[in-house]
Image (spheres, rainbow, N blue to C red):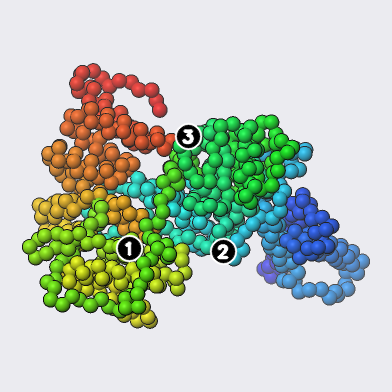
Amino acid sequence: MKGGIWLVRQLARVVVGGVVFVAVLAGMPWLLLALTRRVLADPPDVATLVNEPLSGATLVLFVVAGAWVFWGWLLVGAVLEAVDRVRRPDHRRLRPPAPLYASVSAVVGTVALILDGIAQAAAGPHPADDGATGAAAAVASPRTSGMLALHAETPAAGLGTGVGGMDVGDAGWLPLPAVAAGAVSAWIWAQRRRQYQPQPPRGAHRDDPDLAPLPARPDADGRVTIGVADGRWLDLAGLPAGGVRLTGPGGLSALRGLLVTVLAATAGLDSGPVAVITAEDLRSLVGIDGDGVGVGGLHVIESSDAAPGVAAALATGGRRVLIVRSRAGHPGGWPDDVDRTGLTVISAGAEPSLPSWHVSTDGRVGRPAVRLAVLNAAAAAVVLAGLRRVAPQAVPPPDEAPPVTATEDPRQPVAAVAGAAPRRLRVTILGPVCVESINVDGARTPVPLRRSASLHVLLLLAVHRGGATSGDLAAALWPDEPAHLTARRLATSLWELRRSLQQATGADVVHRDPVLGGGSRHQLDPAHVEVDLWRLHDLLDAAGSAATQTERRTLLRQAADLEHGELAEGLTGEWLARPREATARHCIDVLTYLADAEPDHGIALTLLHRAARLAPDNEAVQRAVLRRHATAGDLDGVRRVYNALRDRCAARSDLPEPATVQLYEDLTDTAVTASTGAGAPERTPR
């Protein structure tokens, strides 16, 4: 028995020793060879070694050389020990403990993998082999213009939406700075509205996962982020100065993503990069015509022959110019007299003179640590349309704030008017905003607010029924400005709001309570203020606990009567997106629920069309409208609603969902069969 155990142990030692021996003598050089090929593909020159001995490329070269020396020492030591064992088998040797010696290969392998990551960061995303050979393959390195520009101080990982970005369904993937851009964030909220599935009303509180607010805009110091690399933001400067060719199944999507992120980041600015593209390329890339695009920073030209001259003229002001090509590059080459400084060609066509980055469908380049923004054509078209409609902020900049005299200290409370009869304040925000004072006899008087910031403060307090702190109000109104600059602006806006409302009602209707730790909490006084949104929430909660279906429907009909459009219709602000979407979903749920139980087709269609007005691109609502028209026997209505939906989809280079197309065909086939008595017509398979 003991002899068998001893034999097993000896065999195990032989197996472990053989594995360690093969790993050290074969595995380590295999890793080092792969790493060396990448380093030698573009080695640092002598000037770099002398002038920048601590640069990334130089350090990688030195570490690789040291790793080869270490492996050589291990190889020589193993050979000498084997020879010594043969010559003097009984001689005792002094060598490292067995566990340490056995772990050498694991440590060496780990170091090699770390060095590989360092080399990738220094050399840029390693392009996949796309069949280029000879001279073309020799220039297929993104290091043509130096190292990638990474925001080393701004980690992209751990921000709550994956590694530095957000999946936007089937449309693609975007880095967080692009998500936070105004037109892009508006498109994301529109996508959420479009994909929402109506459900029975269940109270005022909503915990829909896709109602989570979008991530705050990261501090990019004015740089344009086009993706992430190794957990850091990938700056636009990470592209080779001369340009890059985006290949692979995600090449066109990455080209759209790059175009959209650059234009969204510089929307409304007089500085930053600009893009030049032909009308034909724009049409093939995003499906829209160049005429009337009107997007700032996007220059649409008729012919690619004009690209060099137009781009060079734009670059004279020091701005970076992207020449976007969805097909082949400039056919006649670049004229010799054109200065290419500041020009970058981004192409998805055949450009043998450009470095090649192989992009997968999800935007990953070469290896998973590098990811570029990707968008499909429909999404890019919608975002570009949103950029065309970029409007100025509704909140005035600091220099537009009216002066406050020494006797009008906004930090002091507003005194109530003595002898004035208190009046109620009615705030209507379910639709266009209306602020009125109501006398005891029911007469209504509009309440003017001089500052748009004061109106937004009133809206915030109306949305947040329990009140909001000064810090919360300032962060919502001026998210990109430091707190010490917004404190005075908020105090001035609050003072003007309280004074205007006090003059209209005869009472101080904005309560202010101190907060533990400093600051104040502000809240509208429900004894003097009525808000239609509060009434909507109360009715939803009451309907949720109603004892009978009759009582429930009565309460929900009252809630439906409050809907007159979007929350704060006509006003803009990043903070409005989430409460606006939540309120729209409440109204859609109420309207579709009442329509389902309504026997009168006319009333039901009116309710459904009101829901469709809130979500014109939501095909679940549109399908409900189609079914009700069909149930009412209105085949013309079915065709009219479907054709309008199809036209809206075509305007954004999209198609109706397959479920909607199938429903339309089933409804029209059934109607034709019922009217003619013939079988359903055969259709060409889609």
Q: Image check: 175 left or right of 56?
A: left
Q: Nearer the viewer, mark 2 or mark 3?
A: 3
Q: Which residue is mark 1?
A: 451
| C-alpha span from label 3 to label 1 | 38 Å
Please name the amino acid that badge 3 sits on: Asp
Q: Position of residue 221 (x, y in %)?
A: 56, 61
* Residue at the image position 42 percent from the left and 69 percent from the top: 486
Q: Mark 1 packing: few (<14 Cα in 10 Å), some, or many (20+)? A: some
Q: Amino acid at mark 1?
A: Arg
- Residue located farthest toward the right when viewing the structure as drawn: 87
Depth check, mark 2 against mark 1: the one in front is 1
The residue singled out by tag 2 in the image is: 154
Image quarter for residue 419?
bottom left
Name which residue lies at 23% across and 27% down. 636
Q: Give residue 342's position: percent from left, percent from top.
A: 66, 48
Q: Is residue 251 left or right of residue 139?
A: left
Badge 3 local density, few (<14 within 10 Å), some, or many (20+)?
A: few
Marked residue nearer the N-terminal end (2 or 3): 2
Depth order, front residue of 178/198? 178
Q: Which residue is located at x 35 percent, y 22 percent?
A: 683
Near mark 2 (Cα within 10 A), the count class, few <14, some 14-19 or many ≥20, is few
Give the numbered dot on residue 291: 3
